[in-house]
């Protein structure tokens, strides 16, 4: 009795796993072991020890600046892509890495995702800044509009979402794919699905088969060709589940109900359920958490890369918008310079005409002044055209829809004036580079790519091993059905056997017509079905146990060798690109510092040159009025002043842009503009506080 209860408990536990495993698998998605995270995300992937002449990322030669390791980079509080962007992920919308839960709505996983359409209209802030048909725009307003409307940022926002969807795919046991890269599968991919799979087959079959030997089938002998007729139903259900250790569990319950015209069956019709549970565990190839979850780890790193790229795009947009803003400031001021030049040359031309009329000036001087007017007017037209073109460029930076009605023929009026920025470039190069390495998103992305390459190298190393799988199997069967049984021990009649006569023992002759017979007992049909069959199944009356190992050894193993070699080569490429990224940042920082120093010196020189040119022109005009100079000399001095004013203006704008580029090289773009990734992801910054209890103006107005 105890044995039967023990066996029944074992069978019930197996059956209950069919119901409970989906819930466990759903909970397992968010419970990756800490050791798994640490194993898949080390500070630096393991690699062969290099020679003394080689240098790997994270190691500096004597006299060089020590660059931060991958772990240090992730801990940098000022790295936009490392921390702040991920903390604000909830503000962007749903987390596509989680998927739709199976409980309590079991239909939800089989419905399409609800993704809102992109907002492709201009933000309300743009309409608020328009006054009398002019867009009154400060530098801060331009940056704010760029964060709200720039389509490059809008497009880049989708990249983390796409990366999240690939994390969900990797959690299911699939191979993630990314839009901009072609996924190359190296080594052995997970051969199991981490999502539970329930399968089933329900079928009916009726067959009539001609029988060549009726005696063995029990259909009897007839004058015609006998046949065996079978009518049956099958109800087969299965469950399979893979786990992060490479373990694969399958359970099947196959139930057959059949009836036939043969009298030889003990039960007719009969029900035959078979329960089978199989557990398989790789011992060499495919063993371990890292091997089976490498795509999950890589997808998570790729999500961090996507977040960092979003932060990088925000920084690039702010830089581009700032430079385009200052270019528009230069173009508008240059138009004023050219207008002033036209005014000066026109006045000189008019004065010369008057002197020609009274006979105190030669006609050649008038022609010279008129030629200068034409030249200055041509320069003015070019300056005006350049201003209109630059205005369109800036509008493209700060709007989503250039053809919006309110932007038709609008003029942008910059309200931020040119000023001489403070000196920020007087810091040691080593300190500047260290700060840039900590703040620039590119170095963080290179570190994550290096980690993924290390994971691939470890996974392909495991794929070099032969396949050795351990399996254990349990099976139990049940059988029941309808059968004929005697309803009483009292015979109802005697069935004679003509071929067995009763003979006299002396003479050996048949006694009359007497023959041997057998009693015929009353018969009845005993009905039983699925319940009795399952009872015998769960009582473990007919168990089968099996265990063993299977192995497969690829001779030469060239494919696995090729994958491992490529993974190691990719890792070396990432190590080199890591150093290349560091060198690029050093170059950017150094060039930005030089440009700041040079442009600051050029501004001082240009201001001095413009002052001297103005003094020279004033002196030449006085000499001309006294008759000791010619109009040609005045025109030359006027040209010199115009050129000096243009040079001064260009130098000041270059200094402003050099400061923008320096902040970009240092990774300070968001910091100096008082922008957080929270603002960038929401697309709303520098909002004025409302009166308590009133709605936000930006939220209450419709988009333009």
Image: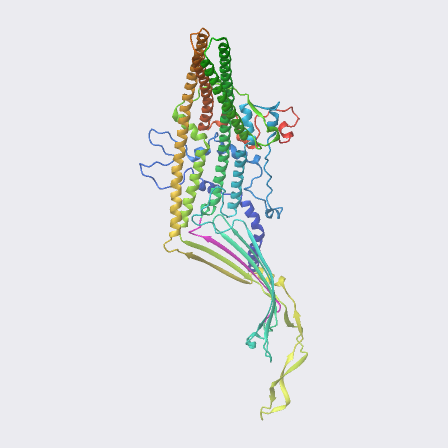
Please name the residue shown 37% across and 29% down the image. Answer: 65
Between 2 and 42, the residue placed more toward the observer is 42
Q: What percent of the width, then of the height, locates residue 384?
A: 52, 23
Q: What percent of the width, then of the height, locates residue 588?
A: 41, 29
Q: Locate residue 324 relative to residue 572 in the image: left or right.
A: right
Q: Quadrant of residue 271?
A: bottom right
In the image, residue 365 above or below residue 425:
above
Between 634 and 619, the residue placed more toward the observer is 634
In the image, residue 263 above or below residue 314:
below
Q: Which image quadrant: the N terminus?
A: bottom right
Between 516 and 699, the residue placed more toward the observer is 699
Magenta part of the protein: which range? Answer: 265-287
Count of numbered labels shown in the rendering: 0
Magenta stretch: residue 304 in it?
no
In the image, residue 620 above or below residue 44:
above
Magenta stretch: residue 268 in it?
yes
In the image, residue 536 above or below residue 156:
below
Q: What percent of the width, then of the height, locates residue 140?
A: 54, 24
Q: Is residue 168 visible?
A: yes
Please name the residue shown 41% across and 47% down the image. Answer: 460
Q: Quadrant of residue 552?
A: bottom left
Q: Quadrant of residue 435?
A: top left
């Amino acid at each position: 009795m105890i044995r039967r209860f023990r066996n029944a408990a074992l069978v019930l536990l197996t059956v209950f796993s069919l119901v409970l495993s989906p819930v466990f698998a759903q909970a397992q998605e968010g419970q990756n072991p800490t050791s798994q995270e640490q194993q898949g995300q080390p500070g630096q992937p393991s690699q062969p020890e290099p020679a003394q002449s080689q240098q790997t990322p994270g190691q500096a030669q004597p006299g060089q600046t020590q660059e931060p390791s991958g772990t240090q980079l992730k801990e940098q509080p000022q790295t936009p892509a490392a921390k702040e962007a991920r903390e604000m992920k909830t503000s962007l919308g749903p987390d596509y890495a989680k998927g739709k839960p199976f409980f309590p709505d079991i239909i939800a996983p089989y419905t399409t995702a609800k993704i809102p359409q992109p907002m492709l209209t201009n933000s309300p802030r743009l309409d608020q800044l328009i006054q009398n048909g002019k867009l009154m725009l400060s530098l801060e307003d331009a940056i704010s509009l760029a964060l709200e409307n720039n389509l490059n940022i809008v497009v880049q926002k989708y990249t983390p979402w796409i990366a999240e969807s690939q994390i969900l795919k990797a959690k299911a046991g699939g191979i993630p794919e990314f839009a901009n890269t072609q996924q190359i599968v190296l080594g052995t991919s997970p051969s199991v699905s981490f999502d539970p799979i329930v399968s089933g087959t329900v079928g009916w079959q009726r067959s009539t088969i001609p029988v060549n030997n009726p005696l063995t089938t029990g259909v009897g002998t007839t004058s015609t060709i006998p046949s065996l007729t079978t009518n049956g139903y099958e109800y087969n259900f299965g469950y399979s589940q893979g786990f992060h250790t490479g373990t694969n569990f399958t359970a099947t319950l196959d139930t057959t109900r059949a009836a036939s015209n043969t009298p030889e069956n003990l039960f007719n019709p009969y029900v035959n359920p078979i329960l089978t549970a199989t557990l398989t565990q790789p011992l060499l190839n495919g063993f371990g958490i890292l091997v089976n979850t490498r795509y999950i780890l890589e997808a998570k790193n790729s999500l961090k890369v996507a977040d960092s790229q979003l932060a990088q795009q925000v920084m690039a947009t702010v830089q581009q918008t700032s430079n385009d803003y200052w270019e528009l400031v230069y173009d508008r001021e240059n138009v004023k310079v050219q207008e002033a030049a036209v005014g000066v040359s026109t006045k000189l031309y008019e004065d010369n005409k008057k002197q020609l009329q009274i006979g105190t000036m030669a006609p050649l001087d008038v022609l010279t002044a008129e030629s200068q007017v034409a030249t200055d007017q041509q320069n003015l037209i070019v300056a005006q055209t350049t201003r209109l073109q630059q205005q369109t460029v800036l509008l493209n930076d700060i709007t989503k829809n250039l053809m919006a009605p309110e932007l038709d023929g609008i003029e942008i009026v910059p309200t931020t004036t040119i000023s001489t920025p403070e000196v920020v470039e007087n810091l040691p190069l080593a300190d500047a580079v260290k700060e840039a390495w900590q703040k620039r998103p590119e170095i963080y992305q290179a570190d994550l790519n290096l980690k993924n390459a290390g994971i691939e190298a470890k996974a392909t190393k495991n794929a070099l091993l032969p396949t050795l799988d351990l399996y254990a199997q349990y099976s139990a069967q049940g059988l029941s059905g309808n059968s004929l049984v005697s309803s009483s021990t009292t015979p109802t009649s005697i069935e004679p056997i003509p071929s067995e006569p009763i003979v006299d023992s002396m003479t050996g002759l048949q006694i009359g017509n007497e023959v041997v017979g057998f009693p015929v007992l009353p018969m009845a049909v005993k009905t039983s079905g699925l319940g009795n069959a399952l009872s015998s199944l769960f009582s473990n009356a007919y168990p089968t146990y099996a265990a063993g190992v299977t192995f497969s050894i690829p001779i030469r193993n060239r494919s696995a060798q090729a994958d491992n070699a490529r993974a190691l080569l990719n890792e070396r490429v990432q190590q080199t690109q890591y150093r290349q990224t560091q060198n690029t940042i050093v170059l950017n920082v150094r060039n930005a510092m030089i440009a700041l120093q040079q442009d600051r010196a050029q501004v001082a020189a240009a201001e001095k040159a413009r002052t001297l040119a103005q003094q020279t022109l004033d002196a030449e005009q006085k000499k001309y009025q006294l008759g000791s100079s010619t109009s040609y000399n005045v025109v030359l001095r006027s040209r010199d002043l115009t050129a000096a004013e243009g040079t001064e203006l260009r130098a000041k704008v270059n200094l402003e842009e050099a400061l923008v580029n320096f902040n970009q090289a240092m990774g300070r773009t968001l910091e100096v503009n008082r922008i957080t990734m929270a603002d960038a992801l929401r697309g709303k910054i520098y909002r004025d506080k409302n009166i308590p209890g009133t709605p936000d103006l930006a939220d209450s107005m419709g988009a333009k």
